[in-house]
Image: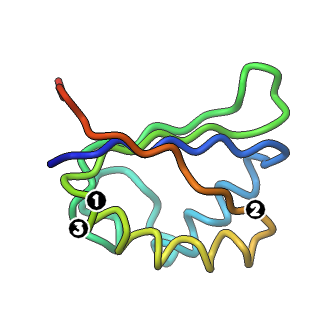
Amino acid sequence: MAIIAVLDLPGVTLEQYEEAVDRLTGGAGLNRPEDWPVRGLLLHAAGPTEDGEGWHVTDVWESREAYEHFAAVLMPILREVGVPTAAPLICEAYNIVS
């Protein structure tokens, strides 16, 4: 079953997000799901929080297992770039429209 993973990252900057993306993809960027080092991503949306004091990320993954495999790759990278890691809010996706 598909899942939604939501991360709110207070204090995170655009520069930290971009550095994490560069490390995650070897500098290739994130333009389509195939660019990710782990298969199973259905949707990725990221942007600054309303107050501009942090970053918000929402992903939809085809399964919890796919997300957990990705998290095992991502979390060390986030620590390297100084992003405080917190447990995401995860819920099952009832409906996905793309």
Front disc: 3 or 1? 1
Could you tell me which residue is drawn at 57 percent across and 68 percent down?
22
Query: Is the residue 78 above or below the residue 58 in the image?
Result: below
Q: Earlier in the sequence, mark 3 or mark 1?
A: 3
Could you tell me which residue is drawn at 26 percent across and 67 percent down?
65
Which x, y percent locates residue 58? 46, 39
Which x, y percent locates residue 8? 65, 40
Quarter of the rendering containing residue 49: top right
The residue under label 1 is which amino acid type?
Answer: Arg
Which x, y percent locates residue 29? 46, 60
Q: What residue sits right under mark 2 in the picture?
A: 83
Q: Circle 3 — which element?
A: loop
Q: Circle 2 — which element?
A: loop
Q: Which residue is more in the foreground, 55 or 29?
A: 55
The residue lying furthest to the top in this view is: 50
Residue 44 left/right relative to 95: right
Front disc: 1 or 2? 1
Circle number at residue 64: 1
Which x, y percent locates residue 11? 85, 45
